[in-house]
Image (tube, rainbow, N blue to C red):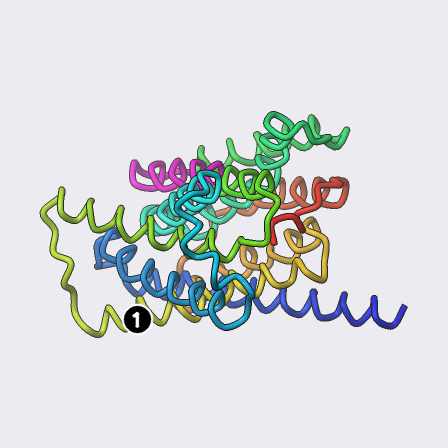
Amino acid sequence: MGRFKHSTNVGFTLAAAGAIILSLEVIFLRSLSDINGFQIMLYRSVSVSFVFLSFILLFTNQKTNVNSLKFNFKEILSGFFLSMSFFCYVFSILNSSVASSLLILSISPVVSAILSKIFLNENLPKSLFVILVSLVIGLFIIFENSVNDSQLLGNSIAFFGAFFFAASVVTSRAIGSNSIAFGGFLAGVFAFCSALLCLFVLDLSIFIHLKDIALICIMGIFTTGLGMLLLLLSTKYLEGPYVSLIALLEVVLAPVWTLLFFSEVIALQEVIGGILILTSICIFLMNTKLNFKNLN
């Protein structure tokens, strides 16, 4: 009993720390609003890959398996989906309000459950229909609050980001291996290559001020990379639904940071839609029996 309580406390601490650290990323992104999104992704991806590769080499027994990733299509596919969710996260924040973006992105656990039913034949909670209705109403309120084309674009990108992240989760579950760190590393590599290609096609420079590069790398290492790693490690001690519940701290805290540091006011529609979405997600996660431990 004591060991179980200790493991639960460790898992809760890791998940809460990861969510809080991830929530700080919006401060960096708002500070970099004058930088092109692809330039941000270029340097952010390098730093995120560095974190995951360091973890693989220093703390896992998978050092000898790095080369085998190129032969594993599902690993590559999972990494690709995750890299696309990275892009969607950054570009949604740059084009919309933080509250709207993160609330829309937070629906990914429900999307994961639906995709798991379709592709892995896993059971769905009986309350899913009611939850979906509540989610749709909440999303409609948020999209209705889009005050311009840029915010509508940002909200739409966040919606696709939720699907890409869910697809990455389901693909990782289908693998059933202990290589999610490899997935994070691959996602960083894919994102870097994609950003580099986009900068080339759009004829944009890869060079930005050294101060901005340093800021992006700090963000990639100490918020994105470290925050994600802590959440992933917490799944060794807590079941996935509980980790996802704690991770919602990011959705609650991030708008608070932008309100405090950038005076980004949260609209009433975002509050109403957010209450519907977060309540739906909490009910879903408390009722679901999906076990995300297979991700590790």
Q: Left or right: where does residue 110 sit relative to residue 199?
A: right
Is any atom of residue 273 visible in this view? Answer: no
- In this orientation, which residue lies closer to the viewer: 125 or 99? 125
Confirm whether the magenta stretch covers residue 160. yes
- In this orientation, which residue lies closer to the viewer: 9 or 49? 49
* Residue 166: % across, % down: 53, 40
Secondary-structure class at tag 1: helix
Q: Quadrant of the C terminus?
A: bottom right
- Circle 1 crowding by C-alpha within 10 Å: few under 14, some 14–19, many from 20: some
Is any atom of residue 189 visible in this view? Answer: yes
Secondary structure that dominates the magenta span: helix
Residue sitting at x 20%, y 45%? 198
User: Compared to 230, does 185 lie above or below?
Assistant: above
* Residue 58: % across, % down: 49, 73
Residue sitting at x 55%, y 45%? 106
Residue interval drawn in magenta: 146-164
Residue marked by disc 1: 215
Q: Quadrant of the N terminus?
A: bottom right
